[in-house]
Image: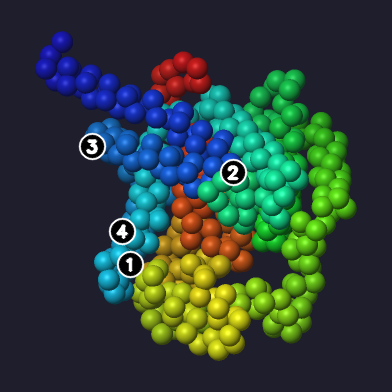
Amino acid sequence: MTAADTAQSAQVDRVRWFDRLWWPLIIFAFASTCVIGTVGSILSVICALICLPMLLDPDMQAQLKGQWDILVFPLFFAALGIVFAINADQPRDMIYWFNFTSLPVATTVYLLARRHSGGNWPLTIITLAFIGALLGTGFGAWQVLVGGLPRAVGLFNNPNMYGHIILILGFMCVPALFLTRSNWRWLYLAGPVLGVAGAVLSGSRGTLLAVPVAAVLALAYILTQPSARRWVLGVLVVAIVAIGAWLVLFVEFDGALQRVSRMAETISEVISTGASSETGTQTRLEVYAGAWQAFLQSPLIGHGWAGAVPAAIAGIEEGRVLDIARTFRHMHNDFLGFAAGAGIIGLAGFFAMMLAPLYSLRHRDALFWHRAYLAGLLISTYAVFGVLDAMFGFDTGISTFVMMTAILAGTFTVHEAQVPNSQPGT
C-alpha cells in the first residue's frame, strides 16, 4: 500500500468514526425532544458540532456543493451574527446569536444523514418520531391528569413548543404505512392521534390551528400512494378516534383546557373588532403593531435580537398590557420577530430557511412523495405556528427545523452512490 493509499484510508476511517454519533443525534432530535425539551435539542446539536471536522474532508466538501437547502443555514447564521453585532449595545447582546447555533450544523447533519440514506433508514427516523410522540403524549397526560398542571409542558420546555413539536412528530408517522410491509404497520396510524392529543393537552391554540392543515396534507399524501384504498378505512377510524379523544378531554378536563375552548371566540372577536377583551391576546396585538413600526424605523438591519422587543413595546401605554409585554423575550410571531430583529436581511434569511425543504424535491426518486409530504408538513406547520408564536425564537424550534430539513435531503433521498453498510443494525 502506498503512502497516498494509507492517508486516504486513514481519512475514510476518521469520517466513519463520526457515524457513531448518528444514533444519539437522531434519538435526541426525535425520540426525546417532547419529554426533555431544550436538553434534547442541545444534545443533538452537540453531537452535530462534534462532527464539524468532517467538513475538512474533500469528499464531504464535494457533497455539499450545490446543496443550497443546507448551505442557506450557515450563511444565514453568519448574516445574523453581523446584524446582531452592528446592533449590539453591549457584548452580552450577542448571547442571542448563540440561540441559532443549530443553523451551521445543518451541514454535518446532512453529511451524516447522507451516509445513512435510503433502505430502512427513513422508516427508522419515522419510528423514532412515533416513539417521541408516544413518550411525549404519555408524559404530558401524566403532568395534566396526575401532576395537576394546567397544561402539558414536558421538561425544560414551554407548553406551546411542546404542542408544536408533538403535532409534527405525530403526523410524521403517516409515511410508515407505505415504507414497510409489516403486518404491524397499522400501529403508525396512532401517530396523528398522539399528535392531536398532545396538542390538546398543551392548551396551545396556535398548535390546534395547524391540525386541519396537517390532516389535509396527510390525506392528500395517502391518495398519491398506489395502495391508498386499503388505508381509507384506517384513516376514517383514526379521524373518529382523534375526534373522540378531543371530546373526552373536553368533557373530563375542561378546567385544564379552557384556553382551547375559548379559541374560536377569541379569533372571532379579533377579526370583527381588531382587538380582544382577553389581556394576553390584546398584548400580542399591540406588540405586533409595535414590531411593524420598529421594522419601519430600521428596515435594513432591524434592532438586533436584544433590542427588538424593547423597540416594539416602546409605544404601548396601557399599564397591564405593558407589564405583560415587558416579560416577552420574542414577538410571538416569526415574521415580525425577524423583521424587527434583523430587518430585510433577517426576512430574506427567514424565507430562505422556510423554503429550504422544497429544494430536496428538485429530483424524483422512489422516496419523492414521502419527502414531499414531510417537506410540506414541516413548512406548513411552522408557517401556522409562526403566526402566534416564535418557532425560531427557541433553540428547540430552530434545531427541529434544521434537523428535519437536513435529514429530508440526506436520509429521505436515494443518492447515486449509497454508502456500504449503512443500514440499521449493520
CA distance for labels 2 and 3: 34 Å
**Which residue does the numbered mark 1 point to in the structure image?**
93
**Which residue does the numbered mark 3 point to in the structure image?**
56
Q: Amino acid at mark 3?
A: Leu
Q: Amino acid at mark 2?
A: Cys
**Which residue does the numbered mark 2 point to in the structure image?**
34
Image vertical order of residue 408 relative to residue 178, above or below? below
**Residue 66 position within the rendered picture, expressed as x and y whole percent measured from the top left:** 36, 46
> Could you say whether the residue bearing mark 3 is in a helix, strand or loop?
helix
> Could you say whether the residue bearing mark 4 is in a helix, strand or loop?
helix
Q: Is residue 21 visible?
A: yes
Q: Name, please, the residue furthest toward the left.
A: 3
**Residue 277 position within the rendered picture, expressed as x and y whole percent measured from the top left:** 73, 80
Does residue 173 appear left or right of residue 361 in this picture? right
Q: Is residue 217 visible?
A: no
Q: Residue at x 66, y 31 (%)?
A: 176
Classed neighbour count for the residue bearing mark 1: other residues with Cα under 10 Å, few (<14), some (14–19), many (≥20): some
Disc 4 or 3, which lies upstream in sequence? Answer: 3
> Could you say whether the residue bearing mark 2 is in a helix, strand or loop?
helix
Q: Amino acid at mark 1?
A: Asp
